[in-house]
Image: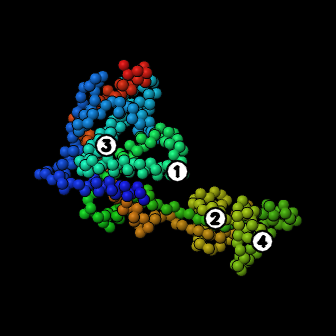
Amino acid sequence: MCKWIYLSVLMLLLVGSCDSNKSNLTEAEKERRILTQKIELVEAAGGYVLMVGGETLTSDEIIDTRTRLSGLFISPKEYFGPLAQANELELFKERTKEQLEEILMAKISNILLYQYAKRQAGANIDEALENAAENEYRTFVLGYGGDQARADEELKRMLMDKKSFKEQVKNNILLQEYRRSKLPDYRPVTYHELMDCYNRIKNKYFARASKIRFRLIDIQPDKLALEDPNADPWQLGNKIANELLRLIKSGEDFGELAKKYSHGDWRDFGGLWRSLQPSSLAAPYDILAVEAAKIETGEIAGPIVTKQHIFIMKLEEKQIAGYEPFEEVQELVREKILLDRQNEVAEKLNAEIRQQAKLGRTDEFIDFCLEKIYQISNTGSET
């Protein structure tokens, strides 16, 4: 609950302090100027730095800062090190350039989003972000019974610490709130949009497989022959099956009869099988799927005779293949539409940043960072 309070406060800070800074520019124009500020490659001692909206971004910040790579929270220098040692420089750069570009674009995006948020909310943004990140860290610790040492040990296992954890939370909040602030309040999700989305995604998210669950009395004549060598096992089996059907119809408990008379693996459980897809039943039990299709839940089928078995089945559950009804998943569909709208905002922002980045010679900066990783990985030194 506290987490959402902090996020709500932060959103108010992000969008609620514009009136005092009115100018001839529209809000959209001011935002565009902030989010597409000049990105420029600048020569510095020992190589290059990137200037992003007036803020200096060094190669060390890119290659030493831990980020998520292939499920690990690790620095690019550590992650790409083995690859640098195993390949020539040009092949190494070819294999890693795309991943490092994504890391750089995310860093640039975070810088510009922070600048945008700060201009909107003023100095209060730092306090709001810190409070939200601290609250999220406390929630994380509570997940380990309030034991901070255990929580920090888990962060260490994830190659993180409290500081990097909180920085990640802050970055996520900035992007999340920017996306949310760009969703037009005047554009409700229409019924037509909901139905279109439902029909588009129902195969992936809402398909419902056929399913049955049943109790089974499995009479096996071969085992009856061992119990009474003088009797005809099939004649005896059919006699037992018919008598059991009479008892079931008179109100006897199917499960108790299964425990006493069934030879099947699930007799100790009253003959109750797990829920399963009919198509998963192998011979000789596949005939049960055919019989289940003919009856409804609660009804009895039998005797069902195969080469080695005489079955009596009670259908406990039956679900026909289809889709979860729209009415039951309507809110999930609405959330999917809103998420898609947010992603459209993020994609548009990323496209604008990438366009500006191309003008700022970021390719040269990426090459410089990769060459630095390569040199450190192969010599253990930056010089």
Tell me residue 66's x, y (percent). 41, 36
Residue at mark 3 to residue at mark 2: CA–CA distance:
59 Å
Tell me residue 302's x, y (percent). 68, 71
Earlier in the chain: of badge 4 and badge 3, it is: 3
Residue at mark 1 to residue at mark 4: CA–CA distance:
62 Å
Determine the secondary structure under disc 2.
Answer: helix
Q: Nearer the viewer, residue 122 or 227?
A: 122
Q: Amino acid at mark 2?
A: Leu
Q: Residues within 10 Å of mark 3 (few under 14, many from 20)?
A: some
In this rendering, the answer to whether 319 lies above or below 252 is: above
Q: Amino acid at mark 1?
A: Gly
In this rendering, the answer to whether 49 lies above or below 289 is: above
Q: Residues within 10 Å of mark 4 (few under 14, many from 20)?
A: some
Q: Amino acid at mark 3?
A: Asn
Residue under the image location 79 percent in, 60 percent down: 222
Circle number at residue 288: 2
Find residue 246 and report its image quarter: bottom right
